[in-house]
Image (cartoon, rainbow, N blue to C red):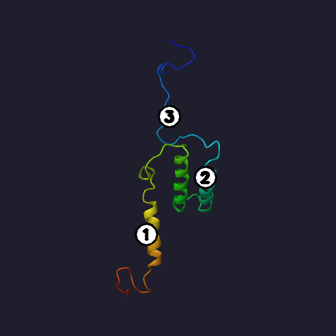
Amino acid sequence: MSFGRPPSINVGFKVSAPDRGSFPLDHYGECKDKMQQYMSCLKQNGSTSTPCRNLSKDYLDCRMSKGLMERDEWKNLGLSNLNDKSKTSDSANTSASPAGENPSGQSRT
């Protein structure tokens, strides 16, 4: 019997880092600028992260390139379609259809 600790703790228990959600702190401020831009964007948008996704991607890219988190694919981080969406929205804004027409070319009545 062991006194001073719960009996359910296994003596051979080994600690390992979690797969996601925890990574080394940026003690030297290597990605501080990117983090501040992202946090500022969140504050301006009422904590809605969608308008800040480009900044989020920049921040995570900085952390991965500086070795502050393990490099991972953008699709695993939910950011794989980010560039595609921005290109699509840019082309949609530049190719706006004339008034009274829908994108298929038929006039509205």
Could you tell me residue 70's position as x and y percent?
49, 43
The quadrant in which the C terminus is found is: bottom left
Sequence-wise first label, 3 or 1: 3
- Circle 1: is it few (<14), some (14-19), or many (20+) Cα within 10 Å? few
Could you tell me residue 42's position as x and y percent?
59, 58
The residue lying at 60 percent from left, 41 percent from top is 25
Which residue was labeled with disc 3?
Answer: 17
Which residue was labeled with disc 2?
Answer: 35
Sequence-wise first label, 3 or 2: 3
Could you tell me residue 38's position as x and y percent?
59, 56
Q: CA distance from mark 1 to mark 2?
A: 26 Å
The residue lying at 57 percent from left, 17 percent from top is 4
The answer to whether the residue labelled 3 contacts the one labelled 1, judged by CB atoms less than 8 Å apart, is no
Label 1 element class = helix
Front-most of 105 and 71?
71
Sequence-wise first label, 1 or 2: 2
Position above or below: 89 against 109: above
Could you tell me residue 35's position as x and y percent?
60, 52
Q: CA distance from mark 3 to mark 2?
A: 23 Å
Q: CA distance from mark 3 to mark 1?
A: 39 Å
Looking at the image, the residue that sits furthest to the right is 28
Label 2 element class = helix
Front-most of 66 and 104?
66
- Circle 3: is it few (<14), some (14-19), or many (20+) Cα within 10 Å? few
Indicate the amino acid at tag 3: Ala
- Circle 2: is it few (<14), some (14-19), or many (20+) Cα within 10 Å? some
The answer to whether the residue labelled 3 contacts the one labelled 2, judged by CB atoms less than 8 Å apart, is no
Looking at the image, the residue that sits furthest to the front is 65
Q: Residue 88 bears which disc, if any?
A: 1
Indicate the amino acid at tag 1: Thr
